[in-house]
Amino acid sequence: MTRTNRFLQLAALAAGCATSDATPAKDVSVELAAVTLADDCGRPPPQPARPAKPRPSSPASPSVVAPGDCGGPDCGGHSRCDQTSMQLSFKAPAGATRTTIKIKKVELLDPKGKVLEVLTARSPARWTAEGSYVAWDETIAADQTVASTYELNSPSWDKLTNGRWSAHSKTFQLRVTVTIGSANRTVEKQSITPARLAPPVPT
């Protein structure tokens, strides 16, 4: 064996060892944790992450409002606006390289699995230890768990259920194709009942 061939063989062996030490992106787990089928509230995007500040203790903690929820009387004539959204949980094992995550497709299906329409995901955000959602760059590092949320445009209720008021009497499925690194993964949630529309607030 020539010295050149020996060098190439050792280089290939070293490269193989380096590859085996890193956990591939396909080992990042993903779960479609929750889905809200409702309206499109058009809220501002979540704020960038900020350094945590000490908060004064209080006898009762305020309730957490998910992105897109509107809890006052100025929500388009209703007491509340529920944003159509989905919550995805990602977990990267120890040794994984930092990985990029993208939502490739979000499909709304009927109970039998027929695709009704494709929804658009926007405004990725992640849950923080401080108890709020902040804007997320859609990356995950080794040994990290990310509880994320994405806003979705509202389904075409006039076409699907003859109006928003009738939507809560139907059930749907959601199928999400997620690109993790360069690999596509598909997760689903079944038996989703749209949020009931709140009655108008008297004026």
Image (cartoon, helix red, strand yellow):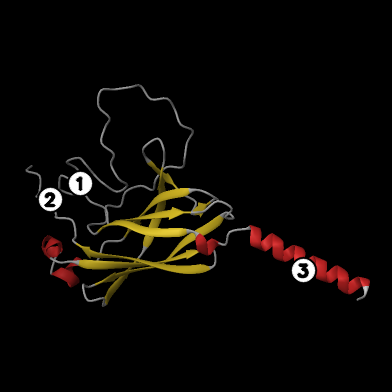
**Residue at the spot 73% in from the left edge and 64% down from the top edge:** 15
**Residue at the spot 41% in from the left edge and 53% down from the top edge:** 124
In terms of secondary structure, where does tag 1 sit? loop
Residue 200: image x %, image y %?
A: 10, 49
Q: Earlier in the sequence, mark 2 or mark 1?
A: 1
Q: Earlier in the sequence, mark 2 or mark 3?
A: 3
Q: Which residue is mark 1?
A: 75
In terms of secondary structure, where does tag 3 sit? helix
**Residue at the spot 48% in from the left edge and 65% down from the top edge:** 179
Relative to the observer, which residue lies in front, 63 or 69?
63
Q: Which residue is mark 3?
A: 12
Closer to the eye: label 2 or 1: 2
Does the rendering let one see residue 156? no
Does the rendering let one see residue 35? yes
Give neighbour class at mark 2: few <14, some 14-19, many 20+ (Cα, 10 Å). Answer: few
Q: Mark 2 belongs to which amino acid?
A: Ala
Closer to the eye: label 3 or 1: 3
Decide if residue 123 is on the left or right side of residue 70: right
Q: Mark 3 belongs to which amino acid?
A: Ala
In terms of secondary structure, where does tag 2 sit? loop
**Residue at the spot 10% in from the left edge and 44% down from the top edge:** 201
Q: Looking at the image, which residue sits at the far left?
A: 202
Residue 168: image x %, image y %?
A: 14, 61
Q: Mark 1 belongs to which amino acid?
A: Cys
Alpha-carbon span between mark 3 and mark 1:
62 Å
**In the rendered image, which quarter is residue 63 located in?**
top left
Where residue 198 is drawn, which disc sits there? Answer: 2
Q: Looking at the image, which residue sits at the far front?
A: 1
**In the rendered image, which quarter is residue 159 located in?**
bottom left
Residue 68: image x %, image y %?
A: 29, 48
Q: Earlier in the sequence, mark 3 or mark 1?
A: 3
Residue 196 in the image: above or below residue 179: above
